[in-house]
Image (cartoon, coloured by chain):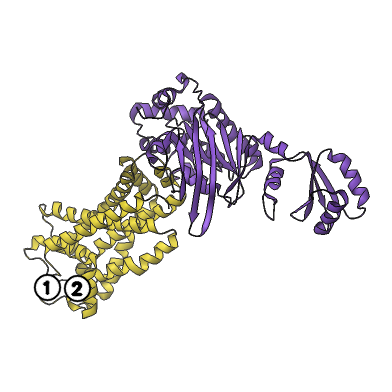
Chain colours: A purple, B yellow
Amino acid sequence: MQPGRTRTQLQRLREPARSSCPPAVSTEPAIEVTNLELSYGSVQALRKVTFSVSSGEIFGLLGPNGSGKTSLFRVLTTLSSPTAGSISVFGENLLQAPGGVRRFAGVVFQSQSLDRKLTVTENLRHQGHLYGLRGPALRRRIADVLDQFGLSERASDIVEFLSGGMKRRLELAKSILHRPLLLLLDEPSTGLDPGARREFWQYLEALNRDDRTTVLVTTHLMDEAEKCHRLAVLNEGVLVALDTPEALKSRVGGDVIVLRTPHAQQLSLSIGSWFGLPVAVVDNTVRIERPKGHEFITDLVESFPGQIDAVTLSKPSLEDVFIHMTGHAFWESSH
Amino acid sequence: MASLWQREMVRFLRQRSRVIGALGTPLVFWLLVGSGFGSSFRPATGAPEQGYLEYFFPGTVLMVLLFTSIFSNISVIEERREGFLLSVLVAPASRLSLVLGKILGVTTLASLQGGLLLLLSPLLGIRIAWTQWPLLLAVVVLIAVALSSLGFALAWKLDSIQGFHALMNLLLVPMWLLSGALFPMSGASSWVRIVMLANPMTYAMSALRQVLYLGEGQAAPDVCSLATAVCVTLLFGVGTLIVSVALVSRRSL
């Protein structure tokens, strides 16, 4: 009996059939990351990152490219060693005993990890072997996951002939073949069209709901982030916020007003001094957070006639949360 | 491990161009270079009378082994960054079995092709006795293990296929050229001779050549005895294998 793991979790590891799994309700955190630091030479990719993921939740790591989320993902999947800090996964020390984590985590990479020259079934069979599954038990399990992800009819097709959405589903099927307690996904819907992305998330949510699989997903897509139960926002290697998407959005004061103008800097200073408000310039637009935004817009337009080209008023989105926390746009320029 | 080995076989057979390239290239090379140099070739003094095509034949076998080992390991570069190997690295299967599975797969492919080519030797008048085959194949397999481990270690260290090609042209092909595959050491100038003596592939070449002519009653005169050649090749293979395992066991890529 390995220490630090509850009875239900051990049962799940050994359980032959998914349907007979008891719902694993546990207050024990699935992942605990403490003061994690990672540097590549002089570049600090992660600075004192601390958070914990509860068992059974969908946890999102949101951040733009270069925010450190992929570095963090690589540490969690035992591919790189951190410079300092500690991580435990279901009570096992990831840094000292990566083998434990490898056993009960399933991983979906941003890039493809399928062998394109092999068939769907062959890919799954090799994956099974890597996790010590063999023989009739493996064959039954493969049939189960193919069915679960709607891939049964393509079982003997060579992977390179599958559509992008199907390949991603196969990645997901592959990662849960050994019934992991924890599923780690790195920007899993990269390159999928919105329809395929929605479908992918339906499968992911079903896994979380029916199998009580804990999910950690990194993303730079706001609509994906919205679907997470809790979100950690990363910016330049620092964890800037951690909460539910709703709570994060409520941190932004009221409504968000964005003004398009030829002279953003100048206008923001005038508005700031006129109304005595904090005003930000983000991506050449003037940005104001304020309750009852619709009333304020009237005042604004009347006070600065001819200087404003366009006005948008919106409820705060996660993108606004990011701007609110970091002072700059999620996508620095083009987006 | 068996799973990784099997994958290597299936992949190879599904890529027809690889099958043709791996066997066809050395054959074409052998015929062209062998025929072209034929008239200007002077066998080492005291060597049995042999034409250049025949001299170059074991060299071609070594080339098949080298090329298969190199080309089958190129996939390591891509698959480690994005692809199949990533999921192997995060699985509980041991790193040792990853390395061994891959290297054994490549070794099998290389040996099979080397063996196929050796079947042509009677055409050149090289008689291989039945009793000679086990030893001959053992040497082929040994060389294949050494070269695939070398290929694996290099592929693991490099991050681009372009880099691998550069290294192949800069290091691996010259190693083959200076192994006695193209010309015997006895005719070379002294500094080339020193380089050849330091080149592990020289011993692999020598072992192969000597085993091939074992049935003739007289081993072709060469750099060293068969036992020494086999030992050096064995050491080389074990060394590169250890390096490969050590590289893969290190965490962080």
Mark 1 neighbour density, 10 Å: few (under 14) some (14–19) many (20 or more)? few
Q: Which residue is mark 1?
A: B47
Residue type at mark 2 is Pro
Viewer can see residue A9 = yes
Residue B193: quadrant of the picture:
bottom left
Q: Pinpoint residue A265: horizontal percent, then vertical percent.
A: 80, 58
Coordinates of residue B207 in the picture (x, y in percent): 16, 62
Q: Residue B242, relative to residue B221: is it above or below?
A: above
The x and y percentages for residue A303 are: 92, 50
The residue located at (19%, 74%) in the rendering is B185
Give amino acid for label 1: Ala
Q: Which circle, 2 or 1, is nearer the viewer?
A: 2
Left or right, A161 with respect to B145, comes to right
Q: Residue at x 47, y 29 (%)?
A: A145
- Establish if A93 lies above or below B148: above
Q: Which residue is mark 2?
A: B184
